[in-house]
Image (tube, coloured by chain):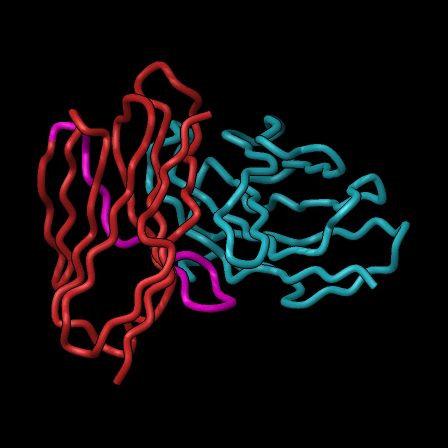
């Protein structure tokens, strides 16, 4: 089954810097989603980008999608300590694919004060 | 955590025992999901249900069973056939079961086999 793969696996930056995470996937999609998980908690939905969209913003988050390269990036600007978490991309199976989301392995982001 | 509750938060099981994890939602969502997460890993789908009285196997269904008798509830039983059940279990729901909708997650149950 297709799977989003995040890169890097771990990222450590100073507070105030920008953080960029990437996601690659294998087959066509309807949407790509990004989720955040604080340690030991459930996932929280951040943003959904449709296959016909190239960029989407939500507060300090910016997501881009390049369907020709089958890749997406999540940019967090002006990072804060509270942004420390794992970030996952999730892809669906496209119009004819399986009706479920497939999650990547995640990027562990640490914001140092 | 978006109207989804999971209980208990921590669960300890002796080898050979079956245990049932509870998941309840008050979002009036049609679809519900169970995922397993191992340390430092992503989520793997165990079972999902798009409608009451119907469910499908996910990628790692062996050793698990579910039921969906009510729209609000989707309990997961970890059976003694599951060889390595120690993990973090997450339940989620979505408005319908099209597969590409936003999913809302519960807080999780951490299962440890003693």
- Residue at the image position 20 percent from the left and 63 percent from the top: A19
* Image mark count: 0
Residue sitting at the far right: B16
Front-lying residue, A78 or A57: A78
Toward the viewer: A61 or A99? Answer: A61
- The quarter of the image holding the N terminus of chain B is bottom left
Residue B92 in the image, given as x and y percentages of width and height: 48, 47
Letter of the chain in cyan: B
Vertical placement of B67 versus B55: above or below?
below
Q: Position of residue B10 (x, y in %)?
A: 68, 67
Classify residue B67 by image quadrant.
top right
- Examine the structure image and report whether residue B102 is included in the region drawn in magenta: no
Task: Please say if A13 is above or below A2.
Answer: below
Taking the image as shown, residue B7 lies to the left or right of residue A93, namely right
Q: Residue at x 39, y 30 (%)?
A: B99
Magenta part of the protein: which range? A37-52
Q: Position of residue B61 (x, y in %)?
A: 67, 33
Q: Is residue B38 left or right of residue B92?
A: right
Chain A visual colour:
red
């Amino acid at each position: 089954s297709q799977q989003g793969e995040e890169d890097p696996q771990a990222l450590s930056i100073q507070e105030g810097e920008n953080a960029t995470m990437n996601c690659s996937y294998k087959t066509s999609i309807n949407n790509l989603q990004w989720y955040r998980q604080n340690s030991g908690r459930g996932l929280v939905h951040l943003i959904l980008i449709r296959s016909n969209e190239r960029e989407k913003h939500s507060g300090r988050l910016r997501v881009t999608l390049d369907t020709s390269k089958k890749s997406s990036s999540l940019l967090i600007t002006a990072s804060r300590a509270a942004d420390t978490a794992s970030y996952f991309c999730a892809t669906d199976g496209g119009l004819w694919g399986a009706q479920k989301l497939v999650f990547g392995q995640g990027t562990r982001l640490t914001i140092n004060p | 955590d978006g109207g989804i509750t999971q209980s208990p938060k921590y669960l300890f099981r002796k080898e050979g025992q079956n245990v049932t994890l509870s998941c309840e939602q008050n979002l009036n969502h049609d679809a519900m999901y169970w995922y397993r997460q191992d340390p430092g890993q992503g989520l793997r789908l165990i079972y999902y249900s798009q409608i009451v009285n119907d469910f499908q196997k996910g990628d790692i269904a062996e050793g698990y069973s579910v039921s969906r008798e009510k729209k609000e509830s989707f309990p997961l039983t970890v059976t003694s056939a599951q060889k390595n059940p120690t993990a973090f279990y997450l339940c989620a729901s979505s408005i319908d079961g099209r597969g590409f909708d936003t999913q809302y997650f519960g807080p999780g149950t951490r299962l440890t086999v003693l």
